[in-house]
Amino acid sequence: MTKLNIFDHKWVNMVFEGRNQDYGAYVLRKKSNEYTIKGIIFAIIGFTLVIATPVIVNFIKANLPSEKVVLLDDATKLEEPPPMDKDQPPPPDPPPPPPLKSTVKFTPPEIKPDEEVPDEPPPTQEKLKEIDAGQETVEGDPNAKEELNETDGQILMSADINPEFPGGESKMYEYLREHVEYPPAAKEAGVQGKVTIKFAVMPDGSIAQISFLKKIGWNCDESAEKAIKHMPRWTPGKQNGHPVAVWFILPVDFTLDE
């Protein structure tokens, strides 16, 4: 009998010749070669990982950025202030406050029952032309200069006294009729409508921050804006007796004569 190689499958066939080869032992011995090779490979891989793991860990630790500790020194210490010069004159006193301007108490109109109406009547328009309206009646210097009060840059939607075009509303519409030009192209095309413009009347009566709430095109918007830009200074609105910036909404009609 010749020598048999244990990795050769012939001896398995010889042992199980004439026996039931469907039994599990035959299959296991048939694939024993494959299982042996896989076991050797896994053993080599496992042994390699065991040896290489400490080397890999030490390599990673060596390449990690080290934390830097910053030590505080005396750089943040403040130096003592220099001694005061006795010969240096003291700072000047602040200027005195401006003289108080006279105001008359003005309460906005409010609908109430007769028994709740205060006995004190509101000031007349002639009185308001001479003395500013305010929350309380104050006797001040009649020659005091009026100070501008822009309420920290805020533009009010309305005030105690709203701004007014010189001469009143009728003069304002008369100005618009004279200065708003109806664009020829819009006339020929039969364009009609209403341009609604929003602008601010500043504490000095000037016009600022013009914007459109409604446009109709055909250069009608630009024509209305141009007329408003060149308006004379308004009488500014007043809040608590001081001039303030107030929004104003003005519709400008473009209507063709029939």
Image: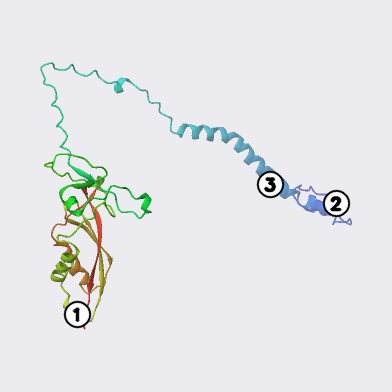
Answer yes or no: is residue 226 visible: no
Q: Residue at x 16, y 62 (%)?
A: 229
Which residue occupies the foreground of this view, 170 or 232?
Answer: 170
**Between marks 2 and 1 in the image, the one whose residue lies nearer the viewer:** 1
Residue 108, percent from left and from top = 29, 51
- Quadrant (top left, top right, bottom left, bottom right) of the C terminus: bottom left
Image coordinates of residue 170 in percent, x first then y, are 18, 66
Circle 2 — which element? helix
- Element at badge 3? helix
The disc label shown at residue 187, or none? 1
Q: Is residue 56 left or right of residue 72?
A: right
Report the disc number at residue 15: 2
Which residue shows up at 13% across the image and 16% down it?
A: 86
Cβ atoms at labels 3 and 1 below 8 Å apart: no
Tag 3 residue: 38
CA distance separating discs 2 and 3: 24 Å
